[in-house]
Structures are given as C-alpha cells and as structure tokens.
Amino acid sequence: MSTNCNSAPLSVYGASQSWGVNEVYHLYKRAAFGISPEDAKNILTMTPEQAVDSLVDAAFNLPPTAEPPWANNYTNSDQGNNDLKKEWRYTMLTALKNNGLRDRLMLFWSNHFVTEYQSHNCPSYWYNYINTLQRNCLGNLKTFVHEIGLTPAMLVYLNGNQNRNQSPNENYARELYELFTLGEGIGYTQTDIEETAKALTGYTLRDDRCAPYTFREIHFNSDDKTIFGRTGNWGYDDVIDILFEERSNEIATFIVQKIYRYFVHPILPDEVIINELASDLINSGFVLEPVVRKLLKSQHFFDVNAQSVIIKSPLDLLVSLYNEFMMPFPEYGTDYVANALYFWGENMGQKFFDPPNVAGWQGDQTWINSSLLLSRWSYLELMIKRVYNAIDKELFRDLAIAIVDDAGEDDVEVICTKIVETYLPKSLLASADYLNALETFKSNVPANYFEDGTWDLQYPTVPLQMRDLLIHLIQQPEFQLK
C-alpha cells in the first residue's frame, strides 16, 4: 500500500530553495494542464511565490466562457444535434488547455458536484452548470453550494425537480451531506436527510422543456422540520445556512481533504496539515481562493515526496500533451482529432462531463489496468505521429532545441538526459531504462556521427529521433505520473 511520506510544512516555498524547471513542471502539471519548455523558462524568472500568484490571480480574474448562441434556448433538447455537442466539448477541451488553474478547478468541481449530461439532455442546462462551476471555483464555498443545488442540471440529475411536499425525494439531501459537504456518515443522520428533503421541496416549476426551474409554493412542505437539532419551517436557504453554521468544521475538513488529494497526494498527510487548511477555510469565511493559494505556495506542495505521486487522468494525458510537447491544438471542423479527443478520453476511462455515477471518477489507481494502459499508449502515439506526418515534423526539432536551449549542442547523452528529465522529473527507474531511451534516440543515425561531430540538433534526422524518443517515453510507467 502506498504511503504519504511528505512531512514538509505549509510554510511558503521560497526562492532560496530548489527552484528549477522540475518545480515549474510540477506546479503546472498539478495546477494547470502542463507547460511548454519555452514558457517554463519564463516562469523561472519569477520566484515560486510569484509563479503561484500569477496562476491564482489569472484564475480568479478570468471571466467565464462566453455564452454560446444556444445558452438560453429553453425550448428544445439537443437530441440529434451532434454538431452542437461536438463544438461545446471542443470549447471545453480548449479551455482546459488554455485557461490554467481556472479550468483545472472547473474540472475538479465537476467531479465533486457531479451531474451527467444525458440525465437532462438540455444544452442550456449544460452551459448554466459549467458557468456556475467557473464563477465559483475559487469563490465562497457556501455560495457555491447554494447555487449548484438550484442549477437545472443538478435538480434533474438528483431529482430535486420531483421533490414535492406530499412525496419528498431524498436524493439531493443525501448527496448534499454524503458527497458534497460532510462525507459519508459524518455529522448527519437518516432523520436529518429526511427532514432536509422536506425543506428542499418546491423547485418544480418550469415554463418549457429546457427552461430553468423556479419555486412553486404549492409544492413546498410548510411543516416544521428538525435539521441538526434545529426546528423551524425551514426552506432551501435555511438548509444551507444551518449546514454551514452547525457543521462548519466537518465541511472544512471534508473539502480540504478532497482538494489535498487532487493537488498534492492521493494519501492524506499528517492531520496537522489538514487541520491547518481547514481552519484557514473557516477563518476566510469559506472563501476557497486563499486556501488554494496557500497550499500551492507551500513547501509541502513542492516537496520531493509530493512529486510524481499521482496517476494522470486521461484528460491530463490528452490535453497536457499539447502544452508539454509544443504541439498545435487541433482546429475544430478541420481536424478529426478535435472531436476524437472526447472519444479517446472515454476509451481510456474518462468521458468528459459524464462521470460513471454521482460519486464521480475515483481517479489515481483506477485509471490504470492492462486494457486502459494500452489505450493510453496507442492514442498518445497516434497524436504524436499525426503531428509529425500531417502537420509539421520540424516542430519536434523546435521542441528539442527549446529543452536543450542550445541548437549547436552535439553531446547526444546530454541532450537525451535533458529530454528524459523534462518529461520524467525523477528520471527513469534504472540505468538500463535510460540506456534504452538513449538507444531509441540514436537509432536512426550512424554511431560514428555522434563521435566525429557530424551530428547535432541541426542534423536532418533530429525530428524523427525526437518523435521516436517521445513515443518511447509515453510508454514508460514514470510518464503516467504527475
């Protein structure tokens, strides 16, 4: 069983500590979807604290994705309108690639406040849900919880739209406590669920097939309810108020544990770390931004024991490859890959915006088995070869030069080592594995060319050598980690 050996504190990670490209890659693999070697050098001109601030500030200030033309189309579902779904999926994948921490958090929260598109099949609901995630991802958690429960997507998915005074539906009340705020069996009883369900009744009225739901007084249960020991004629707003007043410690602990597992390590650390972050969340009035900022700036986050310990999700692999390998993102409508990325993710176990159930993707080791691993290798290889064969093979030479930072470098072992350590910060497990990578990189060039000075990064075969080395690296166990 894996363990978390990270004992570093939450003190700020200073510029006087190790601050090189490996730390930059670590930050951007976790808090974004990778970074190119060229951009990594620019980040190195900052201190670690400034680098994190730039990521968090950009995420905090970035406006939500612009409304598509169908955002307020309340009449029809998109059933049969595959072009609409394809275009919006592409928009969201592009957002993951380009928008750094903001849409890294959007993806995180979509796997926390889970809905499934096919449950409602309404484009307007889809847009409203994403907009809610983006606007609240670093904001006030209490506001977030309040808003997400009234999104049409959530009301349909967890049957809130069917929750009436004469027949309360407990689905949302249960998941509000078990999955969204407290954790399974922590701080609530079955009676709390039943009474909460009564308080959440009434959001059942809509004017058209895909219109928002509004409150309908006749469907509200106006009896007194007792929730967490407090009795009154509670409604939706009261539920959220009582929850955050009576269970603030439990909420803070549950949320920071989930944030920690996503950004730092799949195994929780010493409780001192979690307790400090939970206290920070409470003291901030449940504003998420200062907690995320503190965690990402910390010695604990940058500690060597926090690096390369999380298995990449399929979306990590697919989206980050374009940033880290400096490959142009496919253009919608002109490149089949723009639509294929969605299906490749599904075949690797992560269907974008359609998690397997209300608990979401469990992540980490669940991403890997013999079948899924083969899919990872084959799709990434296809992506690399497509750029080489159909777009511009010289991009691979540009990548090698950006990594090595010297177009005239001719020491093949120095070059190969820099490339390996760029994508595998802890390098390969054994020296024999490195020799295999080196032989792959050298395989298309006569051996004496490396000895007599004929070969350097300007040599004609370099794009092919780089392509083959990258294909070799994506198949290494170490590449599956971030």
Image (cartoon, grey):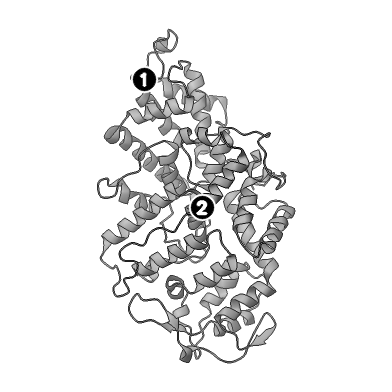
Front-most of residues 150 and 464: 150
Residue at the extreme right? 272
Is the residue marked by circle 1 packed among few (<14), some (14-19), or many (20+) residues within 10 Å? few
Is the residue marked by circle 2 packed among few (<14), some (14-19), or many (20+) residues within 10 Å? many
Circles 1 and 2, Cβ within 8 Å, touching? The answer is no
Position above or below: 202 against 106:
below
Give residue 460's quadrant in the image. Answer: top left
Under tag 1, what secondary structure? Answer: loop
Q: Residue 59 carries which label?
A: 2
Front-most of residues 284 and 101: 284
Q: How far apart are marks 1 and 2 (CA)?
A: 44 Å
Residue at 32% across / 48% down in the picture?
A: 338
Position above or below: 2 against 218:
above
Residue at 36% across / 36% down in the picture?
A: 384
Which x, y percent locates residue 353?
42, 60
**Amino acid on which disc 2 is placed:** Ala
Residue at 50% across / 41% down in the picture?
A: 480
**Amino acid on which disc 1 is placed:** Asn
328 sits to left or right of 304: left
Residue 394 visible in the snapshot: yes
Q: Going from the N terminus, do you reach mark 1 or mark 2 first?
A: 2
Which x, y percent locates residue 157?
44, 72
Front-most of residues 346 and 391: 391
Under tag 2, what secondary structure? Answer: helix
Which x, y percent locates residue 423?
50, 34
Q: Which of marks 1 and 2 is in front?
A: 2
Position above or below: 408 against 185:
above
Residue 468 visible in the snapshot: no
Instruction: Determine which residue is flagged by label 1.
Output: 444
Front-most of residues 63 and 163: 63
